[in-house]
Amino acid sequence: MNNLVYLVPLFPLLGFLINGLFRKSLSKRTIGIIGSGTILLSFIVSLVLFFDVKANGGSVVTYFNFIDVVSFQIPFAFQVDQLSVIFLLIITGIGFLIHVYSTSYMYEESSDHLGRYFAYLNLFVFSMLLLVLGANYVIMFIGWEGVGLCSYLLIGFWFKNDNYNYAAKKAFIMNRIGDLGFLLAVFLLLNKLGTATYSEVFEKASTSLSTMDVTAITLLLFVGAMGKSAQIPLYTWLPDAMAGPTPVSALIHAATMVTAGIYMIARSNVLYSLSPFTQDVVAVVGLCTAILSATIALYQNDIKKVLAYSTVSQLGFMFLALGVGAYTTGVFHVMTHAFFKALMFLGAGSVIHAMNGQQDITKMGGLVKKLPVTTWTFVIGVLAISGFPFTSGFVSKDEILIAVYAHSPVLFWFAAFAAILTAVYMFRLMFLVFFGGFRGTHEQEHHLHESPSAITIPLIILAILSLVGGFVQLPKIFGGTDFFNQFLAPVVPAINHESAATTTAEYYLFGGTIVGLVIIFAATRKLFAVNQFEDSYKGIRKILADKWYIDELYDAVIVKPLNSFSGFLKSVIEKSGIDGLVNSVGRFVNYASRQLRLLQSGQVSSYILFMVLSITVLFLVFWNQEYIIQFLQKTF
Amino acid sequence: MSTSEILFWSLSVLALFGAIMVVISKNPVHSVLWLIVVFFAISGHYLLLNAQFLAIVNIIVYAGAIMVLFLFVIMLMNLNKETEPQKNVWMKISGVVSGGLLLCVFISSVISAFDINGKTALTGGGDIGLIQNLGKVLFNVYAVPFEISSVLFLSAMVGAVVIGKKD
Amino acid sequence: MPIQYYIILAACLFCIGVAGVLTRRNAIIVFMCIELMLNAVNLLLVAFSKMHYAAAVAKDAGTAAGTDAQLFVFFIMVVAAAEVSVGLAIIVMMYRNIHSVDINFLNRLKN
C-alpha cells in the first residue's frame, strides 16, 4: 500500500506541468479544475496512507540511488511514517481548500496568468510534499529549496509592480541565508557520519557524534529553520511577503512553508535531544520572536500585516515548544495553527475582495452586516488563536504553556505574556474590521457583498476544523486522550507531563484563560469597535507601528554596505581589473603582431640573416641533444 | 712535415685568404679574380686527395665557365667601382658575427664527435678518383640522374633565354 | 690528414661564404659567395670520400667505397652551373629594370 506514496507528489507535479505548459490554451475553469483536482487526488492518497500507517506503522520506500560516491550514498527514498503522514494530510487538505478558494479569488486574472498561478501553486505543493516525504536530509533539502523558489515566484506573482518584486527577492534571499546553515549542517553530517538518511543518522548520533558536533549540526539546522520559518533575525521577509495574493499568503505563510522548519526540527528530535544547548537557543529565540512580533502586530493597520506578524509570533510559540522538548506539542500546534491561520487569511482575502482591494483596517468596520459568513468564521478563527476554551488553538497553546512551565517557570511567564498579547491584537483586528461603524467611502459601502461559495465553503470547513481539531489531544482533565501524542510516539517522543504540579497548573491555566479573555474582550471592544479611528501613533506606539525599525537597521547595516561593496567590486575590480586584464591581453596581441610585422621588411639580407641564425641554433640543439636533455632533466 | 702536409697547409692558407678577399674586396672584378684563386686552391686540394677528375672538372667548369660568365655580367653592367653606398654597420657586424657563430657551432661539433677519431682522408693514393672508376659507377649506378641532369641543363638554358628576352 | 682538418677547413670556407652573403649588398657578390659555399661543401665531400675509401681499403683492396661522394660533387657542379646561368639572367633583368644591383632595392615583399 505504501508503494503508492509516489502518487502523492506526482499529481501536483503533473498539475504544474499541464497548467504551466498549456496555460494559454486552457480555459479558466479547466485550469482551476486541474489545479485543485490534483491536490484532491493527493489528499485522497494521503488519507489512504494515513490509515495504512495507523495500522501498520511507518516504512521507507526507496526508488533509486540519487548520489552514489565512494564515501556516501544518498538514495531517493520516501519515508512514510506517522510524522510525515500528518504533514501530508495538512498540506494536501488545506492546500486543496486554498486551491478551490483561489479559483474564485483569482478569477479576474487572464487565463495564462491564472494558469501560471495554479502551476506555481502546484509546484509549491509538490516541493512541500518532497520536503515532508524525504527519507534523508538531501531530499528534504530539494523540497526546502523548491518551496523557497515557489515563494519567490508566488510573492512576486504580480510582477509588474516593482515593490512586489523587491518583497519576493527579500523573501528568497533571506531564505537562502538560512539554507546556507542547512547545507552546512548536512555537510557536517555527511562528514561525521557518512550518511544523511534519517534512520541511520538517528541510530548513530548518540554513539558517533561528539557533543560539539551535535551542537554544531543542530544549530546550523536551526539557522535554516530561522530563515524558512521566520524567526529572529531572519523574519522580516514574512510581513513584506504579504505582497502576494492572499491565498498564497494563506497557503505558504500560514499553513505550509513556514512550518517546514518545525517539521525539520521535529524530525531531527533525536539530534536535538542530544544537545541541550541548542534546545535552549531554540526556545529563547522562539520566545523572543513571539514577543517581538506580537508587540509589532498590536499597531499594524494592514489586515494582512497583522496576520503576518501573528504568524511569526505563533511560529515562535512552536519553536518554544520544540525547544523545551515538547516535539509532539509543536507539531500539534502546527496543525491547529494551519487551520485557524489559513482560515483567517482566507477570511481576510474575502474582506479585501469585498472592499475592492482596500487593506487598511482603519477604513473598514461594521462588516458583520454585509459579510456574515466571513465575519463569523473569522471570529471563530480569532477565538481559536486566542485560546478560547475547547477550540483547537486552546488545546495546543495550553499544551505548549504547560510544557514550558514544566521546563522553566521564567519562560512560562514570558510565554503567557505573549499569549495575552496575541489575544489583544487579534481582538483588536476583529473589532476594527467587523464591528463598529463603517469607516470607508460610500462607494465601498455599496460594493460590500458576501463572497461566492467557492470562497465561503472553504472558510466554513476551516472554521469547523478550528473548532474541533483540538479534540484529538484534549488533556486528561477534560476527559480526552492524547491520541495525537500516541500516534506520533514511534517517531517523535512525547513529553510526559503527568506530574501533580502540572495538573494543577493546567487548572490554573484554564481559569486564567477564561478570565483573561473576558477582560481582553471587554477592553478591546471598548477601544476598537468604533466609528472613528485615528491612525497616527505617537511615542512608543509609533516605534511598534514602525516595526521597531528593524528593517531600517538591516538596510543600514547589511544592505547598504553590501551594495557599496559590490559597487566597488564592479567599478574597481571588474572594470579596471578583470576587464583591464582581458583588454590588455588583446592590446598586447595587437602590439606584438605589429612588431612582428616589422620583421617582414622585404630586405633580403635580413631574411638571410635570420635564416643563418636559425640554422645555427638548429645545429646547436641538434648536435648537443644529450646535454640539453640532461640539463633540462636536472632543472625540472 | 711531409710533402702532403706542407701542400695541405699552404693550399688551405691560400684558399682561406682568397675567400676573405672575395668578401672584402670593393671592386667586383677583384672579387671574381680572388674567387678564381680560391677555386684553384680547392682544385689543388682535390689533386692532393687524388680526385683527378674532379680537380680538372672544377677548373674547367667553375673557374673557366662560371667565373667567366660572372665577369661578362659585371662588365655588362659596368660595375668597375663598387657604387653602392655603405651598408649599415650593424648589418655588417651582425653578418660577421652570425658567420662566426656558425663556425663555432661547427667546430664544437667536430671536437665533440668521437666516431671520426683516428680516421684519415687518404691523400696521394687511391684509385677512386680516377676517371675510369668514376665513369664506371656513374654510367652504371647513376645513369638516370645523369640523363636527368641533361634535362636540367635544357631547362636552365631555356629559362635563361626566356628571362633574358627583351620584351 | 686527419679528417678533422678537412672538416674545419670546409667549415671556415663555408662560414666566410655566409658572412659574405650577409654582409655584401651587391647581388653579384652575394651570388659569388654562394658559389664559395658550394665549393666548401664539395671539398668536404671529396675528403669524406677518401676517408671512407681509406677505411674500406684496409679490409679489402680494390674496393670502390667512396665513389658516390665524388659523383655527388660532380652533380653539385652540374647544378651550380645551371643555377648560375639562370641566376645571372635574373640579375641582368633586375639591372634592366632598376639600373642597380643593390639587393636592398628588392623590397617588394615589404609588409
Image (cartoon, coloured by chain):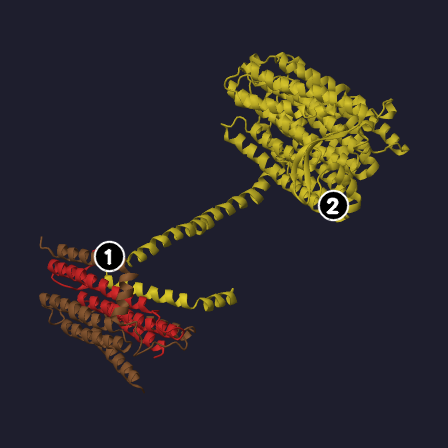
Chain colours: A yellow, B brown, C red
Circle 2: residue type: Thr
Q: Report the amino acid beneath label 1.
A: Ile
Pointer 1 indicates a residue of which chain? B
Quadrant of residue A7 within the rendered picture = top right
Q: Name the residue located 57 percent from the left edge and 44 percent from the top edge.
A: A558
Question: In which quadrant is the N terminus of chain A drawn?
Answer: top right
Helix, strand or loop under label 1 = helix
Q: Which mark is residue B148?
A: 1
The numbered disc on residue A507 is none
- Tell me the quarter of the picture where residue A504 sits: top right
Q: Judge left or right: residue B165 versus residue A318.
A: left
For label 2, the residue is A215
Q: Is residue A293 above or below residue A36?
A: below
Q: Nearer the viewer, residue A571 or A295?
A: A571
**Quadrant of res A14:** top right
Q: Residue furthest bottom?
A: B1
- As measured in the structure, the alpha-carbon distance from the residue carrying label 2 to the one carrying label 1 is 95 Å
| Secondary-structure class at tag 2 | helix
* Residue B50, percent from left and from top: 27, 76
Of the residues tagged 2 and 1, which is closer to the observer?
Answer: 1
Left or right placement of residue B92 versus residue A163 in this view: left
Mark 1 burial class by Cα count in 10 Å: few <14, some 14-19, many 20+: few
Is residue A595 in view from this perspective? yes
Other residues around mark 2 within 10 Å, as few (<14) / some (14–19) / many (≥20)? many
Residue under the point 54% across and 33% down:
A166
Q: Image point 73% across, 33% down: which residue?
A: A318
User: Who is closer to the viewer here, A29 or B49?
Assistant: B49
